[in-house]
Amino acid sequence: MPEAAKSAAIDPITLQVIGGALHSIAEQMGNVLYRMSYSSIIRESQDLGAGLFDIDFNTLCESDSTPMHIGSLPGYLRGIAKRIPLEAWKPGDCAIHNHPYEGASHSPDIAIVMPVFFEGALVGFSANTAHHVDIGAATPGLIIDVPDMYAEGMLFNGLKLYEAGRRNEALWQFIADNTRVPALVMGDLEAQIASAELGVRRLEELFARYGKPEVQSACAALMEYTERMLRAEIAKIPDGDYTAEGFLDDDGRNRGVTLPLKVTVKVRGDSVEVDTTGSSPQVPTCFNVPFDGSTKVACYFAFRALLLDTYTHGTDLPQNEGSFRPVTVTSPKGSIYNPIAPVAAEARFCQIQRMVDLIIKALAPVIPDKVTAGNAATLSFAAFSGVRPNGDYWVFLEVNEAAMGGRPASDGPDTIEELMRNTRNNPLEDLGMHLPLICDRYEVRDDVAPGAGRYRGGQGVVKAQRFLAPGFMTHESDRHEDAPWGVFGGKPGAVGLLTVHNVDEPGSLRDEPAKISGLRVAAGDVITYYSPSGGGYGDPLEREPAKVVDDVLDGFISPDDARHDYGVVLAKTDDGYEWGLDPEATEILREDLRAARAA
C-alpha cells in the first residue's frame, strides 16, 4: 500500500462502509465459485477461498471459507510475481498458478488471479483458489507415495491463461488433455474465472464510487486495525518459549517409522514466532509441507483462531493481512515443514493440522481459558475412483469429519470439520446419483469413548463407502498411533482406524494404515473410516453427573465408563429400560476416587 494511503485519515463511517463492501465482495466471489462449480469437492464441500489484494499482495478481504485457501493466496501472488512483474499485467489478463515451491498451498489447489485497473493504473488483484478433483497425478485424485513433485501432476508456474482478454487455447487444451475428468476440471476453472471477474468488477466499482485515495486509505486503516487488535492480544501472553511435541504415524511408505513433531512458540511483547526446529526431516514421499503456502498459513490461522475468535472476542474484526503481520515462522530447510525441491509436497494437511494442535497445547498453561484439549487434528481425505464401461474415469474426493477436544466451558463438538478445514460434507444423495458408490454407514462413532473430562472430548465419525464396481482408493490420513491428549486432568481421546472388508466374504475384515496409495478394490469392498475422538478438558470427577447420564443414554460412553472415568454410579430406573443416576452412591464413589488419587 502506498505511503500516502497509510498516512491519510478517513472518517469512521466511510471506513465501515468500505470495509463492509470489501467483505461483501469476497463473499460474493466465494458464492459464485461454489455455486458454478461442477466437482463435489468445490460445489458441495466448498474447498475454496477467494479475496482481493493490493499491489503489494496484502490481503484486503477474504471469503468465509476454508482458512487454508485464503491465507495462502499472498504466497501465490508472490510466486506469480517472479514470472509476471507488476508492469507486465494488462486489463483482461488471467494467470493460473499451483507450484508448491512458488507459494502454492499444494498442487491440487489451483489459483486464478486477475489484475484490477483503475484510471489506467494497476490497483490490485482479484484471486481465488479451489481444490481440483484431478490434475493428472500418479494416482487418481490424491497421491501419497510418489518420488518427486513432477509426479504430482500438472504444475503451473505463473502462466497467463488469458492475455488481454484472449484465452490461451493451447494451454486450455493442454489442461483438458491431462486430467482424468476434463468435464469437471474445466467446468471448475470456468467457475474460478467467473468468480475472479466478479471481484475485478466490484473492486473497480468501489474505486469509482469513493476514489482511489479514499479506498486505499480505508484498506490501510483496516489492516492496521486488525494488526493492532491481534498484537494487543499477544501482549497479554507472558513472554517466554512454550514447547509441545508429538509424532506422525509414518510417511506413507516406511511403515512403523514415526515422524517427530516439535513446535516452540516464542512470545516477545506483541509479536510471536513459531519455530518447528526438531520436527522430522523431509521425507521421500509427498508427505511434506510447502513452507510459504501451508506451513506459514497454519501458524497465521492458529493465532487468529485462538486470540481473535469471532464468538469469544466480542469485536467484529475485518479478515485481512493485519492478522498475519505479528506472526513469524521458522522451519529449517530440508525439514518436513520446509522441504527442498524437487521432493513432493502434495499430502500436507495432516501435518499442518497437528502443528495447530501443538501450538494450542504449547500455550495451554498460559492461556487456559482460550485453548482446547487435543483435537483430532488430522484429515481423512479419500479419493475414490474407477473407469466406467465407456472408458471414462470417475473420481470422487471426500473429506470426513472428526472431533475437537473439550473446551474451557463446553464439550468438544462431535463429528465436525475441526481446525483448518471448514469444509462441508457431501450429500449421500449426490454420491448415489452419479457414482458407483453407496454409503453403508454414516454415524457417530460408538466403538470407543471420547476423552473423559469436566468437559469431554468430541466424538468422531464412522463413514463406510461400498464400491459397486471395481475401482481404486487412495487415503490421506494419520493419527492411528497418537491419541489426542487431555488437558488439566482430562483423559486422552481415541486414535483413528481404517478397515476394508467385502460384503460377500465373511471374515475378510482387515485393518489398513492411515495412508493408502492406489489400493485396487473389487465390487462389494467396503472402506470404513473411524476418525479420532477429542481429549477431555479438566478433571472428569468435576463433570456434572447429569451430563454423564446423558452421555450413557446417547451411547457416547458405557455405564462402566461412567463409573471408572467419572465416578458416576447408574442404576436401572423403575421401568427397567433406561439408566438413571444414583446420587448418593456417586458422591461416595467420587470421594473414594479422590482419596485414592491423593494417596
Image: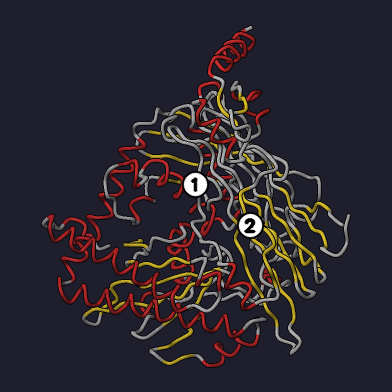
| Residue 276 image-quadrant placement | top right
Left or right of 560, for residue 368: left
User: Which percent across, then down, holds residue 473?
Assistant: 74, 67
The amino acid sitting under disc 1 is Val
- Residue at figure coordinates x 55%, y 29% from the top left: 453
How many numbered circles are shown?
2
Position above or below: 337 against 433? above
Q: Quadrant of residue 262?
A: top right
Give the mark nearer the N terminus: 1 vs 2: 1
Which of the pair 446/58 is nearer the observer?
446
Q: Secondary structure at mark 2?
A: strand
Q: Residue 44: image x %, image y %?
A: 51, 69
Mark 1 and mark 2 residues within 8 Å of each other at the beta carbon? no
Of tags 1 and 2, the one toward the viewer is 2
- Which quadrant of the figure contains the N terminus? bottom left
Q: Secondary structure at mark 1?
A: strand
Give the image location of residue 462, x and y in percent: 66, 52
Residue in the picture at 34% in, 67% down: 26
Identify the residue at horizontal 40%, vertical 84% (top origin). Answer: 93
Q: Residues within 10 Å of mark 2 (few under 14, many from 20)?
A: some
- Residue under label 1, please give it: 329
- Quadrant where the image shows the C terminus: top right
Q: Is residue 153 left or right of residue 536?
A: right
- Could you tell whether 79 is left or right of 343 in the image? left
Residue 479 visible within the image? yes
| Residue 442 numbered mark, or none | 2
Foreground: 167 or 198? 198
